[in-house]
Amino acid sequence: MSDDQIYERRVSPIPKSDLDYSMMTTDTTWGQDYLPSELVESRNKQLMRIKLTNGSIFQIIGSDSYDHTLVGTNPNGVVFSEFAISDPMAYSFVRPILAANDGWCIIVSTPRGRNHLWELYEVARKSEYWFVSKLTVDDTKHIPLEEI
């Protein structure tokens, strides 16, 4: 099996996940506030883990320590935020776990040249199995053009 086939296997690109207890959005909403309280069974701030009433677990793990924090886990979904500055081995480590679980992956990032993000973007762009979207500041209006 070639690397392209491995990349394409049932894993959609979708972000080191930084939605944690200390993250605040630009509209001053805390990341954890997006989860309705009636769906939350318990929260563990030390482990950055939220257990939902249906038994699902939402946990934040930094991709900088993937080699020991992901060992023994069995995620169905993973989000990498700012993947361009993350260790690319984190995705390589979790990819077979997601493939075995028929899982999903979201990768979100600001481009930082032709690095591992660019390579993965090119794989996704050419694949019929992946969804890929490229949004510019003109599309998102996140930063006023006069600030650039």
Image (cartoon, helix red, strand yellow):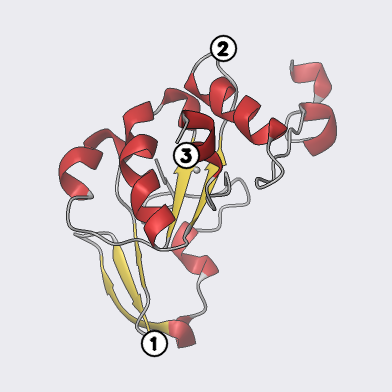
Is 32 or 122 nearer to us in this picture? 122
Q: Number of callouts in the render?
A: 3
Q: CA distance from mark 3 to mark 1?
A: 34 Å
SS category of the residue bearing label 1: loop
Q: Which residue is mark 3?
A: 6
Q: Residues within 10 Å of mark 2 (few under 14, many from 20)?
A: few
> Residue 137 location in percent, x, y?
77, 28
Residue with the most extreme front position: 1
Q: Would you say residue 77 is visible in this rendering? A: yes
| Residue 135 marker | none
> Residue 134 location in percent, x, y?
74, 33
Q: Would you say residue 20 is visible in this rendering? A: no
Mark closer to the observer (2, 3) = 3
Q: Which residue is mark 2?
A: 114
The amino acid at mark 2 is Arg
Nearest to N terminus: mark 2 or mark 1: 1
Q: Which residue is mark 1?
A: 53
